[in-house]
Amino acid sequence: MKAISTLIAATFGAVALTGCVFGGNNSTERSVVEEIEGGSNPYLWRASLDTLSTMPLVSADPFGGTIIYDWKSFEGSADERIKATVYILDSRLRADGVKVSVFRQVNEEGTWVDAATDPETGIQLENAILVRARNLKASELD
């Protein structure tokens, strides 16, 4: 559970630190909306990548709306690892437009074994993604 707490803390820290990365007055910058045409909501897509940027990326399908992250262990809890999958369920920016599944394993005598994950973890990550997506959209409207 310590790794999950670390992931959540890192996620909220990343959201706070990257809050001003997008937007600005540079006309050569591409907007978030220009990054994805068709498929998933571009704000939710970019926010998902930003929010879970500390996780190793396995695959990302913007048209299908799926982002798969690989296993990661965190400092201080080497015998525990987590991975996540993000599903962007709507082309609109809606509260129910993103779903995060978090998986956890613990190392028992050299073998990784599936372990329970607090269901709140996925919800907290979804909320962090939604906050980031709203900030991205607001920065482009300014």
Image (cartoon, rainbow, N blue to C red):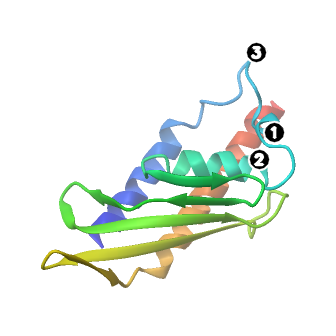
**Which amino acid does the dot numbered 3 rest on?**
Thr
Quick one: quadrant of the C terminus? top right
- From mark 1 to mark 2, how far is it between C-alphas? 5 Å
Q: Are marks 2 and 3 in contact (CB under 8 Å)?
A: no
Residue located at (15% from left, 74% from top): 110
Determine the residue positioned at 62% across, 53% down.
Answer: 60
Q: Quadrant of residue 72?
A: bottom left
| Left or right position of 83 against 65 | left
Residue that numbered label 3 is attached to: 28
What is the number of the mark on residue 42? 2
| Residue 34 rendering spot, x and y as whole percentages | 81, 35
Disc 2 is placed on an element classified as helix
Name the residue beneath numbered marker 1.
33
* Inter-mark Cα distance, 2 to 3: 19 Å
C-beta proximity under 8 Å, tags 1 and 2: yes
In which quarter of the view is residue 137 placed?
Answer: top right
